[in-house]
Amino acid sequence: MKPSKSNTAANITIKNISEAELSGPRLLLSKLKNELFNRKKSDIELKRASIKPKRQKNYKKLLSVIICTSGRNSLALNAINSVINQDFSSEKYEIIVVNNSRENFCGEFFEQNIRIVNEPVQGLSRARNTGADSAGGEYLLYMDDDALACENLLLNMFKAFEKHPGCAIIGGQIFLKLPTPNPNVFLKGREAIWSGYTVPYKKFKEVGEQYEFPYGACFGIRHSALDGFGGFPEDYGRCGNDFAGGEETALCFMAKNSRLKIGIEPSAAVWHVVSADRFTKEHIRETIRAGILTTYRLYAEGYSKCGWTNDYIDERIKIITGELARLQRNKEFLAYFYKKCELDAFYEVKSMIL
């Protein structure tokens, strides 16, 4: 499945992160200053990698594709099939399926390069680390179980790592596949709530801001770098019904703090086929809440230099309150709901700081 122009509008841009059309000129300037230029020297020592990634000679494969799943066999099988149909020699890669469930993973595979690894302890970060421990690839490519590889995903990700040896982490685009008909709670420009990640550029680009960091549905990392980071931090990441993520973002901050590079390769891409039952107001509310609380936690625990101080939170609350007033006047009720979820989350952060 190839993306078309009508459904690949970039959502990872400064314009989207600031939601310029919601703010008006005065609020927009305040918001950009507040969001992008709020840096503070923290008393907390920033988290760094313990070693710099080096090329090692004992890897058995060039690339390991790691797919973590928990009780969603049919989805994972679709993801696996999208990978094995790639134009990339089976001798060069392997697929590690991490079964993060107490039930058996059902599936018959004739390819010799597919392995099932069981991890009964719940938690996406734990499953991702188990996958890495079992992997023999020099480069690791993580895909969600409800993602489908686009054409030449493996080849393009491999080439990106080879061409950019200074990059510890390379992500790709994630095209969001909406249910039909379009859910009535979906708001264009907010695809990131369902892990949509699309960029306006066509060539590889180094990135450094949090809003640009890649997501786990299409997340590549050097095996040696992940070892240097100590794996995904297992106190972050989804577990059961918990919406909190942040483990990939924590790794990106560790790379940045260690002066390692992070890049995006637009030609490496997947489709994220999100089930219709995730397009609910409850999912939106919990995802927005988790994202804001996790971002504060990344600052408080020394990953990020962004100063989530009481003054910063107060300014964000003031800006959002102004945006809500504009949305209410213009009768943009769906956008109002999204923005109200943000306001509630910032008030929750404020209560934590106090």
Image (tube, rainbow, N blue to C red):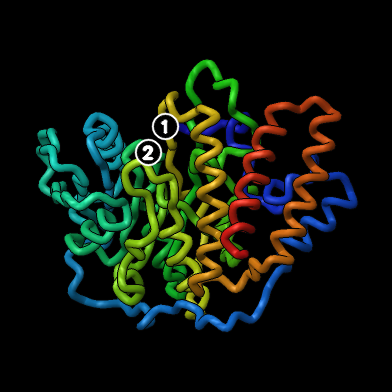
What residue is drawn where x is 84% and y is 28%?
A: 330
Find disc 2 in the rendering and name its residue: 147
Q: Could you tell me residue 354's position as x and y percent?
A: 62, 64
- Left or right side of 317 for 129: left
Front-most of 343 and 81? 343
Three-letter amino acid code of the residue under disc 1: Val
Front-most of 31 and 113? 31
Give me the C-alpha separation between circle 1 and circle 2. Answer: 6 Å
Q: Secondary structure at mark 1?
A: strand
Q: Mark 1–mark 2 contact, CB under 8 Å?
A: yes
Extreme residue toward the right, this view: 26
Which mark identifies residue 203? Answer: none
- Left or right side of 185 for 290: left
- Left or right side of 61 for 182: right
What residue is drawn where x is 49% and y is 55%?
A: 214
Which mark identifies residue 273? Answer: 1
